[in-house]
Image: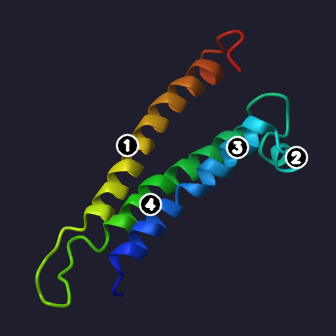
Amino acid sequence: MNAKPGVAALAGFLFALPFAAMNAIVANRVEPFFSLIRPGPHTSAHEIALLVFVILLLPAGAYVALRPVPRKGPDGKRRFHVVNGAAAAILLLVFGTLSFTLGSEIYRCQILRVPYCD
């Protein structure tokens, strides 16, 4: 499969949309989707599993964005596609930040049961 760099960069960024949509639904309590994501009054295992799945789309998007980078162009020369590299770097940076911050938040609230955490 011969991926075009612009399409791959756009597809990589589109992998971030489910997280943005889920975040907007939970933050604004948009029904009926909010009840599907958070069926009870507090964070549930269902919500954490969905969050993990959506956050794992970010490194998948980085992979898709980087896919055309090592390939040779039609003229036989290698080119570094800056937009693809930037898209992958941003997606990986967001993934690392979210994984660390949400992981520590889930650990404090769900494992340690710190009061007034949720």
Residues under labels 1 and 2: Cα distance? 31 Å
Residues under labels 4 and 2: Cα distance? 29 Å
- Rendered location of residue 108, percent (x, y): 58, 18
Which residue is located at x 59 percent, y 27 percent?
Answer: 106
Residue in front for this viewpoint, 115 or 15:
15
Which residue is located at x 32 percent, y 64 percent?
Answer: 84
Q: The disc labelled 3 sits on which kind of residue?
A: Ala
Mark toward the viewer: 1 or 4: 1
**Residue beneath disc 1:** 93
Which residue is located at x 82 percent, y 48 percent?
Answer: 36
Which image quadrant for residue 118? top right
Counting other residues with Cα less than 10 Å from the Cα at mark 3, is it few (<14), some (14-19), or many (20 or more)?
Answer: few
Residues under labels 1 and 3: Cα distance? 20 Å
Q: The disc labelled 4 sits on which kind of residue?
A: Ala
Residue in front for this viewpoint, 48 or 81:
81
**Residue beneath disc 4:** 60
Which image quadrant for residue 39? top right
Mark toward the viewer: 4 or 2: 2
Q: Residue furthest left?
A: 77
Label whose residue precedes the other's in the sequence (1 or 2) = 2
Counting other residues with Cα less than 10 Å from the Cα at mark 4, is it few (<14), some (14-19), or many (20 or more)?
Answer: some
Query: Is the residue 89 above or below the residue 12 in the image?
Result: above
**Residue beneath disc 2:** 31
Counting other residues with Cα less than 10 Å from the Cα at mark 1, is it few (<14), some (14-19), or many (20 or more)?
Answer: some
| SS category of the residue bearing label 3 | helix
| SS category of the residue bearing label 1 | helix
- Rendered location of residue 49, percent (x, y): 64, 45
**Residue beneath disc 3:** 24
User: Can residue 46 be seen in the rendering of this structure?
Assistant: no
